[in-house]
Amino acid sequence: MARPPAYPAELRERAVRMVAEIRPNYPTEWAAMKAVAAKLGIGAAETVRTWVRRSEIDAGQRPGTTTAEAPRELSGCGRRSLSCDAPMRS
């Protein structure tokens, strides 16, 4: 069973919106993400970065697997399973 997210969805959405809103006030997107993390009491700016990137993927602004597509990729015949007996590829 998956564990619940550490931060509520509302906080994640707010952080993503805040980064977009304050980005022009900072020299880099990373600086804006760090500021948002500090303002909202989020432990690491990297957390905010992953939320922003996920939002961009879901909106079609960045290539990648959307949140809606992710469960389909993990299910079905194409799923690979790793066992302790399987040889490691290098």
Image (tube, rainbow, N blue to C red):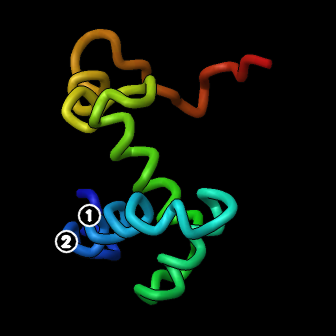
Q: Quadrant of the C terminus?
A: top right
SS category of the residue bearing label 1: helix
Residue displayed at 63% across by 61% down: 30
- Looking at numbered disc 1 in the image, what kind of residue is underneath it? Glu
> What residue do we see at 59% from left, 74% from top?
34
The circle on residue 13 is: 1
Residue 63, image x, y percentages: 44, 23
Residue nearest the viewer, comparing 90 with 69: 69
* In the displayed structure image, the side of residue 16 where residue 45 appears, left or right: right
Which residue in the rendered view is the most extreme toward the front? 24
**Residue 52, horizontal then vertical, whole percent:** 43, 53
Q: Residue at x 38, y 64 (%)?
A: 21
Looking at the image, which residue sits at the far right? 90
Along the viewing direction, whichever of 6 and 41 lies nearer the viewer: 41
Which kind of residue does numbered mark 2 sit on? Glu
Q: Tell me the quarter of the picture where residue 7 sits.
A: bottom left
Measured along the vertical axis of the image, is residue 75 above or below residue 2? above
Relative to 20, say whether 55 is above or below. above
Give the vertical position of 61 relative to 16 (above or below).
Answer: above
Residue 87 percent location from the top left of the image: 69, 19
Left or right? Give the position of 34 relative to 54.
right
Q: Hey, which residue is sitting farthest top in the picture?
A: 77
Q: Secondary structure at mark 2?
A: helix
The residue that label 2 is drawn on is: 10
Position of 1 with respect to 22 (left or right) is left
* Disc 1 packing (10 Å; few <14; some 14–19; many ≥20): some
Splitting the image into 4 quarters, where does residue 51 fall?
A: bottom left
Viewport quadrant of the N terminus: bottom left
Please name the residue shown 38% across and 45% down the image. Answer: 54
* Residue density around tag 2, few if under 14, some if 14–19, many if 20 or more, within 10 Å: few
Callout 2 touching callout 1 (CB < 8 Å)? yes
